[in-house]
Image (spheres, grey):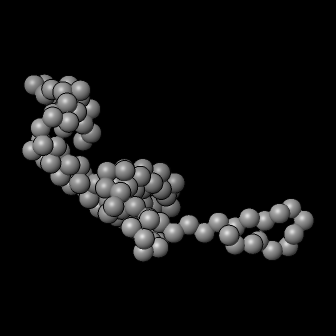
Amino acid sequence: MSLRQACDLPGMPVEDTVYGWVRKIPEFAQAYFWARTVQARRRFDHVWEIAEAATPETAFAARVKIDAARWQALRLAPKRYGDKVAEDGEGGRPQVNVFIQKFGEDEAQPL
């Protein structure tokens, strides 16, 4: 369930209150982070359930659901579910290769 859905339940605080607690109460922030991590794991695991239940007739809808679940998992736990980036060994900065090609020339020249 989303935070908005949880906050819409009777007796629950509004979203702004929850975010205020995350900012001001370290223990709450840690619990909130853990809950989001668990949510990401559940979303990621749900991908397989969607894929197994798909049929040729439901394949397109299943793909949309899978993409949405993967996107959510990535946003909730980017270190765990994000794309791995090659590192150059200097403080963990990502290595980026840039190629520039001038119009009319046949080969790209690495920088």
Left or right of residue 6: residue 79:
right
**Residue 109 placed where, x, y %?**
75, 72
Q: What residue lies at 45% left-to-right and 61% top-to-bottom?
A: 55
Closest to the observer, 1 or 52: 1
Where on the picture, by quarter, is residue 51?
bottom left
Quadrant housing the C terminus? bottom right
Left or right of residue 108: residue 74:
left
Q: What residue lies at 45% left-to-right and 54% top-to-bottom?
A: 67
Q: Where is 30 relative to 109, above or below?
A: above
Left or right of residue 95: residue 6:
left
**Residue 42 placed where, x, y %?**
25, 56
Q: Farthest residue toward the right? A: 104
**Residue 64 placed where, x, y %?**
47, 51
Q: What residue lies at 76% left-to-right and 71% top-to-bottom?
A: 108
Left or right of residue 35: residue 94:
right
Where on the picture, by quarter, is residue 17?
top left
Closest to the observer, 28 or 94: 94
Where on the picture, by quarter, is residue 70?
bottom left
